[in-house]
Image: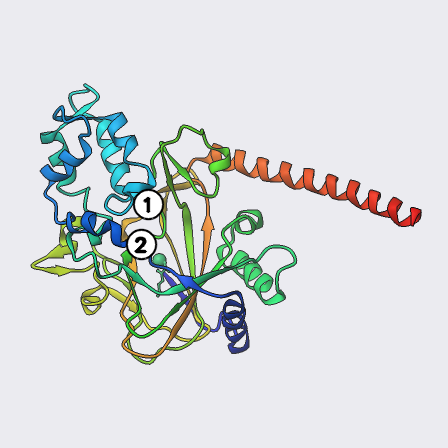
Amino acid sequence: MAEIPDFLSEEECRLVVQLARLKGLTESQVSVPDSQEETADLLDLSPEEVFNLLDLNQDGQLQLQEILTHSSARDRFWLTPENLQEIYAGLKDDPDQDGLLSLGEFKRLSSKALWRFSPQLGGKRSQPVRNSRHTWLYQGEGAHHVLRALRKRVIRLTQLPPLLVELSEPLQVVRYEQGGHHYAHYDSGAVHPEAACTHSRLAANISTPFETSCRYITVLFYLNSVEEGGETTFPVADNRTYEEEALIQNDVDLLDTRKNCDKGNLRVKPTQGTAIFWYNHLSDGKGWVGELDEYSLHGDCILPRGTKWVANNWINIDPDYQRQARYQKLVAQRQQDEAQSGERNSDEHSDLHQDL
Ligand SMILES: O=C(O)CCC(=O)C(=O)O
Ligand SMILES: [Fe+2]
């Protein structure tokens, strides 16, 4: 993780906040609708119970179809896409190669993997995992000059090919009010051949069962200074070894940024204009994006009072090189088509103009 003071001027910070306000912010938390409360109550589940829920035909085995059925949005509240990917991966590497997961196999898999990305699973579902509001600001051609300048600065900072940055997500501006927080999480998803990246899905095989955001780099801007709390926390930064089990021990849940921020390894205090950036993935050793870096786990500590404004620039890269290349080709093609039809339209307009 690197910290860069004065990446933005005071003026620029104010302007980004103003633009976000003008656009309007929406609730970030995907809340559980009342009708889902029953599902929420089921969340203190043992691996056996989860297994039973997944085992739709109740034959005591999990098969591929049952897992894929659960990749639908309906079940997102209690099984995250990452949970499903883990189970799916387990099924694919099935030790006895019968293409089925027995309860025993599932338990070995779920003892460490299943709960990993889901701090809300073991806890009280009524407490939101994230409490903030956000909006998106377009940074492409024709955007406000400050937003364009920011994008250009990010290109210089990351030293990535400009096109990769230009094709990435818009700027996400986030506002936390008193009590705001964001549980520890990964900005990107686990690399898995069956998972398409949201940004390059166009170029993926349609039958890919999972979708995940592929965010190689996070650049986080602090748009105001915060006196107390609201730090960005990296609970396992610099650990010599990474143990998922160590994240929750003796009732201390390091993922819970409302309670245990002081126990994390690294905290960054928000200072207006500062940018921090980090890689969410390791290198694959061949010059491309590799596995998710588990040390990139981070969150936002609870804000006891006041307001905190941040903005996220995520650089999207598909760990599947070919898919990223196909995606870029598709976008280029589309832009070319648009430019051509634009030319045609403007010809029509000029004819029309003459006629008039
Ligand atoms: O607000 C922060 O400090 C961290 C925000 C964050 O991690 C996110 O929005 O993904
Ligand atoms: Fe994040």
Residue type at mark 2 is Ser
Q: Position of residue 352 (x, y in %)?
A: 87, 46
User: How many residues crowd mark 2 within 10 Å: few (<14), some (14–19), many (20+)?
Assistant: many
Is ligand 2 closer than 8 angstroms to the Cβ of mark 1?
no
Disc sitting over residue 292 in the figure: 1
State which quadrant residue 5 falls in.
bottom left
Front residue of 99 and 51: 51
Vertical placement of residue 7 versus 218, above or below: below
Give the side of residue 191 with respect to residue 61, left or right: right
Between 339 and 240, the one lying in front of the other is: 339
Q: Residue at x 30, y 79 (%)?
A: 305
Q: Is residue 111 visible?
A: yes
Q: Ligand 2, what quadrant?
A: bottom left
- Is the C-beta separation of discs 2 and 1 under 8 Å? yes
User: In terms of depth relative to the viewer, which is nearer, 184 or 18?
Assistant: 18
Which residue ends up furthest to the top in the rendered image? Answer: 98
Which residue is at 39% across, 77% downward? 225
**Amino acid type, residue under disc 1 in the picture:** Leu
The residue indicated by pointer 2 is: 296
Tag 1's secondary structure?
strand
